[in-house]
Image: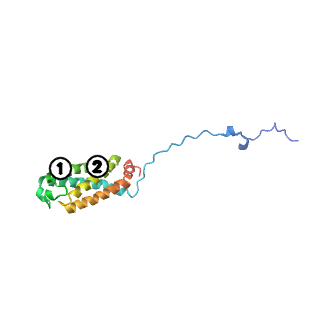
């Protein structure tokens, strides 16, 4: 004889549970997170830009001091410059620009976004000032212009990686 169906306990299978009872708790909404950039091998370019800005800022300030205190040092007279201004005025421009470039380089090394933006602008300005100063000190001005172009490239293309490096996410 067989036991009646009500006498034996039924095993509930997953397929027998109604759909509403099977619903799981709603998943937490996925919130997008702003992922920090990961530093790559190109981080060296940004370090080059920051250190280069600090060194060029010092050299630019020394060039300004030379122009202020020793106007006979240069190859041409002030009237032979692209912008005919006396060397004392050029000296002050170079001195102030050098100090500001040095400080922006320190901000780039600290991973500050504003330092990167200011660094690009100052490197472009420094290149223009040295282009106008080219007749007075041609070799040095050409070197500064070339390094400024490299600094602009490094900060514009790879500057974001410095933030991840300074945050310690290596």
Q: Of residues 170 and 111, which is closer to you in this image?
A: 111
Residue at image position (17%, 50%) is 92
Furthest-bottom residue in this view:
139
Q: How many marks?
A: 2
Furthest-top residue in this view:
6
User: Where residue 112 appears, x then y in whole percent?
Assistant: 34, 47
Lateral position of residue 14 relative to residue 53, left or right: right
- Assess disc 2: are there few (<14), some (14-19) or many (≥20) residues with their C-alpha within 10 Å of its C-alpha: many
Q: Of residues 78 and 96, which is closer to you in this image?
A: 78
Mark yes or no: residue 51 visible: yes
Mark yes or no: residue 112 visible: no
Q: Earlier in the sequence, mark 1 or mark 2?
A: 1
Residue under label 2, please give it: 104
SS of the residue at dot 2?
Answer: helix
Q: CA distance from mark 1 to mark 2?
A: 18 Å
Q: Quadrant of the N terminus?
A: top right
User: Where residue 11 appears, x then y in whole percent?
Assistant: 75, 41
Question: Residues at badges 1 and 2 in contact (C-beta under 8 Å)?
Answer: no
User: Where residue 59 appears, x then y in whole percent?
Assistant: 21, 55
SS of the residue at dot 1?
Answer: helix
Residue at image position (38%, 49%) is 163
Q: Nearer the viewer, mark 1 or mark 2?
A: 1
Residue at image position (51%, 42%) is 31
Q: Which mark is residue 42?
A: none
Residue under label 1, please give it: 92
């Amino acid at each position: 004889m067989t036991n009646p169906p009500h006498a034996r306990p039924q095993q509930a299978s997953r397929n027998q549970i109604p759909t509403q009872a099977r619903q799981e708790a709603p998943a937490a909404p996925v919130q997008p997170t702003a992922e920090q950039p990961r530093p790559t091998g190109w981080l060296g370019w940004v370090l080059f830009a920051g250190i280069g800005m600090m060194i060029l800022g010092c050299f630019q300030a020394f060039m300004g001091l030379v122009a202020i205190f020793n106007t006979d040092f240069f190859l041409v007279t002030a009237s032979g410059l692209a912008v005919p201004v006396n060397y004392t005025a050029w000296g002050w421009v170079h001195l102030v620009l050098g100090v500001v470039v040095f400080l922006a380089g320190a901000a780039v090394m600290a991973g500050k976004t504003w330092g990167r933006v200011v660094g690009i602008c100052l490197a472009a300005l420094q290149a223009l000032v040295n282009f106008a100063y080219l007749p007075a000190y041609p070799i040095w001005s050409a070197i500064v212009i070339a390094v400024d172009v490299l600094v602009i490239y490094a900060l514009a293309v790879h500057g974001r990686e410095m933030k991840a490096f300074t945050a310690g996410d290596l």
